[in-house]
Amino acid sequence: MNRRTTRGRWLTAAAALTSVTLLAAGCSGAAEGDDDGGGATGAPAAEAQATDRELVIWAGSQTPITANFNPYAVGVLHLANGGIYETLFAFNKLQDVDPTPMLAESSEWNDDGTELTVKLREGVQWNDGQPFTADDVVYSFTNDTAKPSYLKDAVATDASTVVFSFDAPAYANEFAILGSTYIVPKHVFAEHEKDSGKDADGNALQGLVAWANAENPVGTGPYLVDSTSNAAYTAKANPDYWGGKPKVAALRYVGIDANQSAEDLLTTGQIDWSTMFVPDPERVTASGAYGYVNTPVDPTVLYTCANADLGCEGDQTDVAVRQALNVAIDRKAINDKAFVGLAKEISPTFALLGRDDKWIADGMPKESPQTADAAAAAAILEDAGYTKDADGFYGKDGKAIDLTLTSVDGWTDYNSAAKLIEEQAKAAGIKVTASTISWNEFADARVSGDFELIMGGVVGTSIADPFQIYREWFTGDYTQKVGTALEPGEWNFSRYDDADVNAAVQAASETNDEAAKKEAYATVQEHIVEDLPYIPLVVNASQTFFNTSAYAGWPTDDDMYMFPPSWQGPSSGVILGKLGGVE
């Protein structure tokens, strides 16, 4: 297995950590972590009325809140990512549309994908009055903390142009460059490159990650930090924002320690924007003061430790067992009973249905089976040499299949789904025991590979292309042998490592030709649909609630201009820039 350099890769891991934590928690809450922009320039200017009413936001923070507005830190507060620091473009995770220009206005690849030229927006300034320049962009990509391993260099060819160069075609990294790297001021951050400190667990930190950036953070975004406390932090509109001064004058991000408390505060009108699982959303919206959207994008699956060659142990290492379990599951019942009908159908190709349909190869099933087929499960097992014992369970050599399915204690939707799978598997002659474990046990198990089946989530792609999932969750470069902890940025918990898949993903990364990518994806899909290292269940609900009686400009089902969760950067910054009061 080829290993890659990891310098800078942990930043990608930090950016994805919020999503993975949310997914791992099912719909149980949040964790810290396109339209045309409203004008000819693409600026996300607010169209509603100016208002002095403070917008109260819960983005998942718990108390005590620790002031940290450093986008390089794992504990960065939500406002920083989008509200203070911005990316070059903002991508709409929900639609196959062009990204919204933010700090850049255009980008263009050279013919072989080894150079990307970005033209920057002119006239932008940092909130301390200093001009935003190409040197800031170069610094944001080349400082020792941030530089990704795939980047050869970034050079400012003039005050508003940056050329990124790579040793190999880098089309697959376009989103990472344009849409997920926050641009920071060189004149501020360069002074903290030699800082040191400790994280919450007492681990030593060096360089930019050690700096909390707690006092008057300098960014280009629509808001300025006003105050911080253990319970909340506040922000005020940036009067010199390049997109126009935001219409909402003040924000308050609150810390809440339990989902039920947050739901109660929503219902009583004390929170204006939040994303959380609410099994009875009508309880929140019944008064007519709140709007609600459900935007499922992230797969919920059964992680299987699938690869015996890398040390996985258990009956799930037999592909026939995984295949039989896959058809024994009644996904419709799971959605109705565990997810109260709010999840959506999943594709075994891991293309997001509706958005990514063009990437599903001919001959591949569009969606996973929605109802259980015990007869099909029995046929798969019997063809593989399994027989039923006196208790009605399939096994070999006098030993029944016996699998443990774990989910995190207290994640009620996932716990309920696991119990349903236990019952459905039993009906097909497969013994699965659902059990709950602590968060720490869950995290340790999936990172070390010490598990059989885990109810967990996959980070859905931020653009209309499943490449990110294929590379980070299915290739051998993103995993380790069982017993060796995965490195930051490695998400292949199943330990899946197939030479054909690895080669196809590599081929897809080196082309910008849609036909060539489809050919590569067909190979990937043929293998993962057959091998099922992750058994797809549903695409998880993502419920966002907005106060529509006091504020206008929210994403709606009719105008889903940006992914709406309150915890999602940088899209939350775009939304903040568009909001205003109601007349």
Image: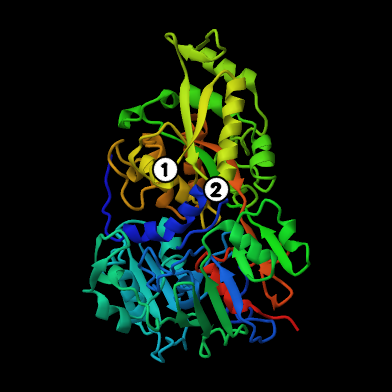
Q: Quadrant of the C terminus?
A: bottom right
**In the displayed structure image, the side of residue 148 where residue 529 appears, left or right:** right
Quarter-wise, where is residue 112 in the image?
bottom left
* Label 1: which secondary element: helix
Q: How far apart are marks 1 and 2 (CA)?
A: 13 Å
* Amino acid type, mark 1: Phe
Quarter-wise, where is residue 576 in the image?
bottom right
Q: Nearer the viewer, residue 371 or 59?
A: 59
Q: Earlier in the sequence, mark 1 or mark 2?
A: 2
* Amino acid type, mark 2: Gly
Question: In the rendered image of this protein, does residue 283 appear above or below residue 480?
Answer: below
Residue 152 visible in the shown view: yes
Q: Which of 5 and 406 is in front in this view?
A: 406
Q: Position of residue 244 (x, y in %)?
A: 57, 87
**In the displayed structure image, the side of residue 436 where residue 73 appears, left or right:** left
The residue that disc 2 covers is: 26
Q: In which quarter of the image is the N terminus?
A: top left
For the rendered model, the colour scheme is rainbow
Residue at 60% over, 38% down: 416
Question: In the rendered image of this protein, does residue 18 appear above or below residue 524?
Answer: below
Q: Which of 32 and 259 is in front in this view?
A: 259
Number of numbered discs: 2
The residue that disc 1 covers is: 442
* Label 2: which secondary element: loop
Q: Position of residue 342 (x, y in %)?
A: 67, 48
Residue at 56% over, 42% down: 414
Q: Where is residue 42 in the image (x, y as percent from the top left)?
A: 58, 78
Residue 564 visible in the shown view: no
**In the displayed structure image, the side of residue 274 where residue 6 appears, left or right:** left
Question: In the rendered image of this protein, does residue 223 appear above or below residue 267?
Answer: below
